[in-house]
Image: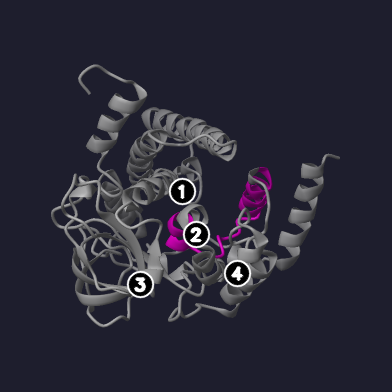
Amino acid sequence: MSDLDTFRADTRTWLEANCPAEMRTPLKGDQDFCWGGRNFVFQSDAQKQWLDVMVAKGWTVPTWPTEFGGGGLSRKEEAVIHQEMHRINARIPLFSFGISMLGPALLKFGTDAQKAEHLPKIARGEIHWCQGYSEPGAGSDLASLKTKAEDKGDHYIVNGQKVWTSYADKADWIFCLVRTDNTGKKHHGISFVLFDMTTEGVEVRPIKLISGRSPFCETFFSDVKVLKSNLVGEEHKGWSIAKYLLTHEREMIGGSNEVGRPLHEIAAASLGLQDGKLSDPMLRAKIAEAEIDEWAFNLTVKRKLAEAKAGASLGADSSMLKYYGTELNKRKFELMMDASGHDGLEWESERSNDGKVARSWLRTKGNSIEGGTSEVQLNIISKHILQLPGA
């Protein structure tokens, strides 16, 4: 057996012994996710047990260095863990923007003190992070942001507003883009800072979406004091950090196309089978096409991650992954509505888990806006990947 085969066998044995049965059942909604944070309330003893054993193993962040709470593993070993978790339908133990976005940025740009302070807490799920990027006048054109950080010696005073701040009403800390200089080009003078959401002057207002629910909020800053020790990277040069973090956000959004059971199983359960297959040949063909496209897309994501591990920069490729993943996700949930039959039309009932299918379908419409609109991603692809004339 190769070392990877041995690791897979050991991983399979460990997961079978340590993943509680309750954590091998489908998620019913946001309430079943483990977000972590200072005020998070576990839904069950099994949810806490699952997080605790994965934290102790370093497998909430398998590839992070062990000194920061990670497992110190390779990308291939991380892939094995995910594959073996999927095999037993194990839930992800911790959902965190700290893991998917801030953590990679701190590993690359943070000081030793910042890494030691924040990364272990992220790995253990002790701090719930939110992202302060978009503003009412600076969405896809993010570099036009106006939130101002005034230099006061050992600290900044921050004033401004952010919008579409996911889970800001539940977050403990925020990683935030602020303008520290307004005299040069708009990409210059942006800085990347961290601060506690309980700091005096921070106000959060939830926003409701078409689905009837929303993780989004408006966030207002009025004379918020931010210590300079919480400045990540160089002052005025936060745009490079912002771009790096956006590649991880776009990869995350593009890859968020998991609908639970395979589409063909959902369709079979909802619509029934005739002679061992769905009676609607058009729906059969569309489902098969979507599942093949998802398989090809996942292979492409793995290839790009392998290239990144070898030292290559994702760069504009993250826009390609974000755009295609977004469109695939929207298409899959359209098909899930079709495959669910009349059940997909339910909006409020215990049987439909409070209209999960319909609400999830409506939620995917936002995928083509968040993290940079699809139009902006196509412009980036045209200019930096296809190098089209005039792009």
Q: CA distance from mark 2 to mark 3?
A: 17 Å
Amino acid carrying label 3: it is: Phe
Which mark is first along the chain, 1 or 2?
Answer: 2
Prevailing SS of the magenta stretch: helix
Q: Which mark is residue 258?
A: 1
Q: Position of residue 75 (x, y in %)?
A: 63, 45
Asked which quadrant contains residue 347, the reply is bottom left
Which mark is first along the chain, 1 or 4?
Answer: 4
Task: Find disc 4 in the rendering and name its residue.
Answer: 22
Query: Which of 230 and 118 lies nearest the eye of the viewer?
Result: 230
Provide the residue span drawn in magenta: 76-102
Q: CA distance from mark 3 to mark 1?
A: 32 Å
| Residue in the image at 31% along x and 20% along y | 387
Task: Find disc 2 in the rendering and name its residue.
Answer: 99
Q: Position of residue 261 (x, y in %)?
A: 51, 49
Q: Nearer the viewer, mark 2 or mark 4?
A: 2
Q: CA distance from mark 2 to mark 4?
A: 24 Å
Amino acid carrying label 4: it is: Glu
- Verify whether residue 266 appears in magenta: no
Q: CA distance from mark 4 to mark 1?
A: 20 Å
Say above or below: 334 vs 100: above
Residues marked 3 and 4 touching at CB (< 8 Å)? no
- Verify whether residue 97 appears in magenta: yes
Say above or below: 276 vs 158: above
Task: Find disc 3 in the rendering and name its residue.
Answer: 195
Amino acid carrying label 1: it is: Glu
